Amino acid sequence: MAPLGWGLGHATRCIPLIRELHRQGAIVVLASDGDALALLRQTFPDLHSFELPGYNVKYKAQSMTWNMAWQLPKIIRAIWLEHRLLRHLVKSQGIDGIISDNRFGCFASKKRSIFLTHQVNIQVPFFLANRAVNYLNHLIVKQFDECWIPDVASIKNLSGELSHPIKPRLRAKAKYIGALSQLEKSNAATKRYDAIVVLSGPEPQRTRLEKAIIEQAEHLEGQMLIVQGRPGQQREASALISKNIEIVASMTGEQLQQAILKSSVFIGRSGYSTVMDLARLGKPALLIPTPGQTEQEYLAAKFLRENVFYTQKQNALNLGVGILEAKKLTGLQGVFFDEKAVENAVATFLAAC
């Protein structure tokens, strides 16, 4: 299991797949980098794990096209290095199958290889750039035996244009397996926090958002919990940094689930894995897309337009208004999950390994 190391979302949505693989008798080996690998090691301490080269993408500019363009040589090198390392792992560890969550180099020609993504149609603002990026994206995906999409095929779905419709060139490989979340729906908990902030994603934007939230939260009433999304720097307990603000480096899935349920509003990035977690728990949210990340900007606009979540841009953050407006909206309900589809996909994959 090889999730991308940009933020924690790719790793967290692999957790239910890892559990299902284990339930069906597979021996799972983990491979990733950075905080994503730290989270998986924290969650599955008994599993063998290996570090892959990091893509180390930075979001310095407001343009996603520019962010990716100037870092393209670095990304291509990382993909080449991870593919070379993966071939070594396949031989040395006796790997029979690979599930890659958006790691383009994690496939092997003679081993069953799955590409997990919610972006079969990457959103790029310029027409020609959009055509070129998606042509390359589809070309890479075709190196894999199947493309698993963590969403449903119906008109009412989570990912919108990111994975609907499937282009003809990928139709034979694509398989909707339903949304994925490490969290589980449970009974409503006694409220402890007015809001929980869950931070993630690439630097320097993660730290910029954290600083902006703390500066504004200190002037608001109500208790707030900030989860920094740094599993490699886990503290024993949360620290009180202000009269109304607790902060903790990271949480396990169970701890995070309980903390979200004990909070009136969720605040965080509009990443797709976050959206799936919110759908599982049915919580209202204030979503703040990473500047320049077109996927998050698309999802934020989509759910604001549908009156599901309230959204604000990072450079126009108004925490007081955002929390009040978020409480007025409905949030999502967990109709996007299909455990049977996940079970069948894993069973088919293992049978072909």
Image (cartoon, helix red, strand yellow):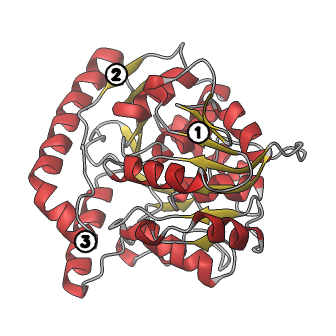
Given residues 345 and 158, the one toward you in this image is 158
Q: Secondary structure at mark 2?
A: strand
Would you name the residue on which mark 1 appears? 17
Is 282 rendered above or below residue 162?
A: above
**Foreground tag (2 vs 3):** 3
Residue placed at 14% from the left, 64% from the top? Answer: 69
Residue placed at 30% from the left, 81% from the top? Answer: 125
Residue placed at 65% from the left, 29% from the top? Answer: 24
Asked if the residue under mark 2 is in contact with the one under mark 1, i.e. CB atoms within 8 Å, the reply is no
Residue 174 position, x and y percent, is 47, 62
Q: CA distance from mark 1 to mark 2?
A: 18 Å
Q: CA distance from mark 3 to mark 1?
A: 33 Å
Kind of residue indicated by mark 3: Ser
Would you name the residue on which mark 2 appears? 50
Kind of residue indicated by mark 1: Leu
Given residues 16 and 217, the one toward you in this image is 217
Q: Secondary structure at mark 3?
A: loop
Q: Which residue is most to the top?
A: 46
Label number found at residue 218: none
Q: Secondary structure at mark 1?
A: helix
The answer to whether residue 202 shows anywhere in this view is yes
Is 181 rendered above or below residue 120?
A: above
Of label 1 and label 2, which has the lower sequence position?
Answer: 1
